[in-house]
Every structure is written in C-alpha cells, then in structure tokens.
C-alpha cells in the first residue's frame, strides 16, 4: 500500500540535521544524537524533475517533527558545498543522480582482481569529481590477491595517479594491510567511497571499524563481478571523529556537466599541452599538430589516459549532439 504524500501539519520547532541514508521516499536525518525518519516536501521533486534524488546523503536539511509519530518533514535543503553526481542509467537515463553531497574527498576503490582493475571507470570518476569540485583519491584494494604477474599493472596504476597528485592507498581488508594509512587519510573528514560491486568497499570499512557490521557479498568466479550488497548510500560515523559514506556498487560512471570542448582541462596530465595545439578548438583526437597527441607519442602522457579521454569525449559528443 502506497503511503500518502506527507503534509506539514506539525507545529513543532524547526530542527537542522544531516541526511545519513536515503531509501525510497524516506530519509534518515541525524539531529544531534537522534536519528529521525523523515520525508520531503513534494515541491522538491516537482521543481527538480531533472534529478532522480533531490535530497542526497550528506545534505544538510531543515525539518519539522510531527508530534503524533515523531517522524520528520523536510522543509528546506541547505546550499551544498559540493556534490558528486553521475548521469542516471535505465528508465531515467540522462537525468542527474547525486551520489553524495558535502564531502571532503571521494575515493574510488579498485580491486587488484575479482573484479579486475578498471582505469576507465576511475578516469570517468576523476573527471566527474573535478568538474564538481570534489577532491578525489584512489584505494587499490585486495592487494593480498596480487601475484607476481599482477605486480607490473598494479605498480603502473599506482604511479600513474600518484604522479598526477592524487592520493593513492594500497589496502587489504582480510590481511589488515594499509588500514592505518587509510584511517589517517579519513581523520577528521567526511569521506565517501565508490567503485564497482565486489571491489570490497563494505569489507574494507568493516575492517576499519568492526562495529559497523556492514553487509558484504561475494564475487562470481565466472563473471568476476560482485553482487550489489550495499543498496543505498549511507553515512557512518567512525570512532575518530571522521565520517564515511558507503555507496552502492557502480558499474558505469556517466560524466555530467562537462562540455566536450572543456574535457581536456579536467585531465591534469593533458591540460598543460592544450594551449600549444595548432588549432584553438583542437579536440586532441584527429587534428594535425596536436600537442596532446605529441605528448602521448613521447611518453609524457600515459597512452591509456589519452584513450580514456577519447572514450569520454565520444560519450559527451553524443550527449551534446547536435549542439557540438
């Protein structure tokens, strides 16, 4: 049976809190030491029809509590310092889906194997984060599964992004490796972690903070892909005055709010060469005398990073066509 739309019938005081989880039409809002199940004004959804979720985990909100059942009614969403969103898939394709709001850093968790490293996903996330003013970092997890054959690829990935200035951590939840460095990186901040299903996000957080007792799943030995055990984003308090948002596994990260002409500026390794191209509107794809392509050929820019750029460029062209 569908719940009736919420109505603001309470005359209780206005309170301010932080959204810690979102499940359908209900939101958990942390107000001091109290968690208040809340719903939102219908106007938020009506006025933001281009967004799948007008309220996201991490949002600061104002609410009023109903006297009869002590549930909340969200009356206002405060201005965000930042957000990380992606292009929605499925029936709402093209709309914005906000993963998290008001965070100090977003971390992409990549597994050494099961599932395999996915630099293309990582590059899309880094572009999306940069476009939305969210600092980002990389966690290479499951290093206990690393073989000698894996070592060159893992080291290449580690050095590739560390050289670009991104913080890179190597961890193993099962062997408790790298947890101290991860704890130090989280210290006193609001962090969020994302990545493909099966990369070990929830298992890693359980190792970091055993009292969380987050649900975990297995990885298929056939497909090498994980199952979705985290079904919605949720903000957790850690014991050292820091916070972390665990997000559902994401198979694809559709970049939003970036024009194809601006894409190269969100690649810190490509952007220094952009103004040296022969043509001011160079796409760094097929044009002659392209400084970016020349840097790739010299080895100053990693070839896979340029390939990632071209793949994202193509998807953005489709999104902006026929404007572009």
Image (cartoon, helix red, strand yellow):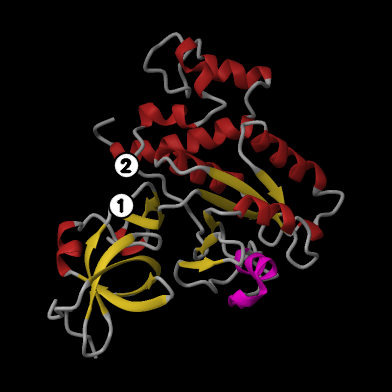
Left or right position of 249 against 66: right
Q: Is residue 254 above or below residue 222?
A: above
Left or right position of 132 against 114: left
Prevailing secondary structure class for the magenta stretch in the rendered image: helix
Residue 94: x, y in percent? 30, 52
Q: Residue at x 39, y 51 (%)?
A: 85
Q: Residue at x 64, y 37 (%)?
A: 161
Q: Is residue 143 above or below residue 298?
A: below
The reply to whether residue 117 is in sight is no
Residue 129: x, y in percent? 46, 43
Q: Is residue 211 magenta?
A: yes
Between the C-alphas of marks 2 and 1, the distance is 8 Å
Looking at the rendering, in which quadrant would you find the N terminus? bottom left
Residue 141: x, y in percent? 70, 56
Residue labelled with disc 2: 319
Residue labelled with disc 1: 94
The reply to whether residue 283 is in sight is yes
Label 1 secondary element: loop
Looking at the rendering, in which quadrant would you find the C terminus? top left
Q: Nearer the viewer, residue 47 or 244?
A: 244
Tag 2 and tag 1, C-beta contact below 8 Å: yes
Instruction: Mark 2: give few (<14), some (14-19) or many (20+) Cα within 10 Å.
Output: some
Magenta-highlighted residues: 201-215
Label 2 secondary element: helix
Q: Residue at x 49, y 48 (%)?
A: 104
């Amino acid at each position: 049976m569908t719940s009736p739309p919420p109505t603001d019938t309470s005359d209780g005081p206005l309170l301010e809190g932080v959204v810690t989880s979102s499940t359908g039409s209900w939101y958990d809002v942390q107000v001091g030491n109290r968690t208040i199940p809340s719903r939102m004004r219908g106007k938020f959804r009506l006025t933001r029809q281009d967004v799948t979720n007008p309220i996201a985990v991490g949002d600061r909100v104002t609410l009023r509590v109903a006297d009869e059942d002590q549930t909340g009614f969200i009356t206002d969403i405060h201005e965000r310092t930042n957000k990380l969103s992606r292009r929605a898939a499925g029936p709402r394709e093209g709309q914005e889906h906000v993963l998290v709001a008001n965070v100090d850093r977003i971390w992409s968790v990549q597994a050494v194997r099961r599932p395999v490293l996915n630099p293309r996903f990582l590059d899309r996330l880094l572009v999306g984060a940069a476009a939305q003013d969210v600092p980002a970092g990389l966690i290479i997890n499951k290093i206990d599964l690393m073989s000698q054959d894996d070592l060159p690829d893992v080291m290449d990935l580690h050095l590739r992004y560390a050289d670009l200035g991104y913080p890179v951590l190597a961890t193993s939840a099962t062997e408790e490796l790298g947890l101290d460095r991860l704890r130090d990186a989280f210290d006193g901040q609001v962090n969020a972690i994302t990545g493909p299903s099966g990369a070990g996000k929830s298992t890693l957080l359980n190792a970091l903070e055993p009292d969380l007792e987050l649900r975990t799943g297995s990885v298929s030995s056939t497909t090498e892909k994980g199952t979705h055990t985290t079904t919605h984003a949720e903000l957790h308090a850690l014991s050292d005055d820091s916070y972390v948002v665990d997000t559902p596994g994401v198979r694809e990260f559709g970049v939003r709010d970036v024009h194809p002409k601006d894409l190269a500026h969100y690649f810190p390794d490509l952007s220094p060469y952009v103004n040296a191209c022969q043509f001011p509107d160079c796409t760094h794809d097929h044009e002659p005398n392209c400084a970016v392509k020349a840097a790739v050929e010299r080895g100053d820019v990693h070839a896979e990073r340029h390939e990632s750029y071209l793949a994202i460029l193509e998807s953005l062209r489709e999104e902006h066509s026929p404007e572009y």
